[in-house]
Amino acid sequence: MNIRDVLLWGFTGTTVLTTIMRGAAAIGQTRIDLPLILGLTLTPNRDRAKVYGFLFHLANGWIFALLYAATFQYFRRATWWLGMLVGAVHALFVLIVGLPALPGLHPRMATDARGPEPTLELEPPGFLAINYGRQTAVVTILAHLTFGAILGTFYRPKPARRAVPR
């Protein structure tokens, strides 16, 4: 596996993905703020949470970049379309499994079963993150397709090792 490319393009892809998500929130397409949500798992201070959350999201991006790289290594190729295909699977996992599981793990998020309380600051995302706006799923999928396209375009798989005859 090409760790240098994982670190470089994982960082780049995560930064672009986060920028797309924040930009979409800024123009009213979604209300989701992943750095804030992730950061609030670590601190109740909303200002610090955004910084901690971005760092947390970046670490997650590197972990996912490793999974993308493993996929590219398996297929012995990295292309924009293979990256986007993996990105689509990644986005669906985030929307269908990851975000809906957050209320059970997040110390400051209400759940679907128990509504908001004065001590819980965040609304649960719901299925396909619909509680954060009708366009949230579309924005999330587009951001993850972009993440995959960046990794698929720029990651270079290491050649397979050939067995040395004895």
Image (spheres, rainbow, N blue to C red):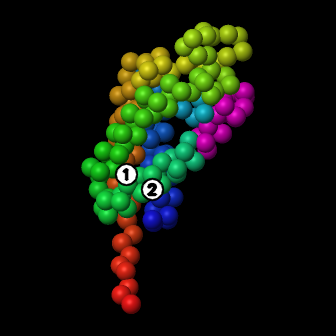
Under circle 2, the secondary element is helix
**Quadrant hosting residue 114:** top right
Of residues 53 and 117, the one nearer the viewer is 117
Residue at the bottom extreme?
Answer: 166
Tell me what residue is drawn at x 50 percent, y 21 percent: 125
- Which segment did they paint magenta? 39-56
The CA distance from mark 1 to mark 2 is: 7 Å
Of residues 14 and 24, the one nearer the viewer is 14
Q: Quadrant of the C terminus?
A: bottom left
Q: Amino acid at mark 1?
A: Ile
Q: Return the residue at label 1.
A: 150
The location of residue 130, given as percent across then percent down, is 43, 18
**Numbered tag placed on residue 162 in the rendering:** none
The answer to whether residue 144 shows anywhere in this view is no
Q: Is residue 100 left or right of residue 137?
A: right
Q: Amino acid at mark 2?
A: Trp
Q: Main secondary structure of the magenta part?
A: helix
Q: Return the residue at label 2.
A: 9
The location of residue 117, given as percent across then percent down, is 67, 10
The location of residue 158, given as percent across then percent down, is 39, 69
Q: Quadrant of the N terminus?
A: bottom left
Tell me what residue is drawn at x 31 percent, y 59 percent: 75
